[in-house]
Image: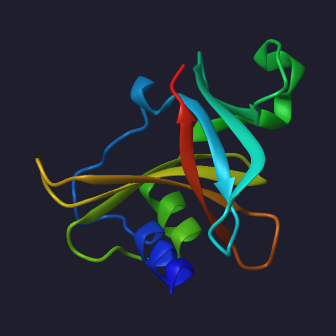
Amino acid sequence: MFIRALVIALLAIGSMPAIALDASDEGVYAVVHRDGHVTSKHIRLMHVRDGWLAMDAEEHGPPESCPSCILMTSTRADVERFMGGPAPDGMSAECAHNSLMAICRVVEGKAPEVSVQYGFVALTQSKPMYLKLVRLAAP
């Protein structure tokens, strides 16, 4: 049930105005296992000059030290491809991606009742795999 709700939330795109990833999205996130427990896999998301950097939270160094960690802002078409189609009314998503993965911010509702969730999309399989992220720390 939880995974189904997460996938529905991650499918949220298109019907609301775009909400680009911004400085408020920077931070350290933990991957949530499909069974709901928070794993020890932590991802640091940082804005860099030409896009975003998503790397293991234990790694340090300049973006040049991990070229495969650089994510570019996703177009609306990219987001639809990652999420499997258009969103239900009242939901929207923005992503940053490379050829292996995407990090997405999903928003549901309208102010002041807005719910923000984050997701990790593995793009290496024939069908994208969606995993929830929980924020552990802001920068």
Q: Is 45 situated above or below 89?
A: above
Could you say where residue 36 lies in the image, as x and y percent from the top left?
62, 69
Extreme residue toward the bottom, this view: 1
Colouring: rainbow
Give the position of the C terminus as an image quadrant.
top right
- Identified at 43% across, 78% down, the residue is 8
- Identified at 38% across, 75% down, the residue is 86
Could you say where residue 106 lies in the image, as x and y percent from the top left?
40, 56
- Identified at 74% across, 63% down, the residue is 123
Between residue 34 and residue 80, name the one nearer to us.
34
Could you say where residue 102 lies in the image, as x and y percent from the top left?
64, 52
Between residue 139 and residue 51, name the one nearer to us.
139
Say left or right for 84 vs 43.
Answer: left
Say left or right for 82 vs 56.
Answer: left
For residue 125, which quarter of the picture?
A: bottom right
Extreme residue toward the right, this view: 65
Say left or right for 94 vs 53.
Answer: left
Q: Is 69 situated above or below 107?
A: above
Could you say where residue 22 lies in the image, as x and y percent from the top left?
41, 29
Q: Is 111 situated above or below 9?
A: above
- Identified at 82% across, 65% down, the residue is 124
Extreme residue toward the front, this view: 37
Q: Across the whole image, how many numbered discs are drawn on residues?
A: 0
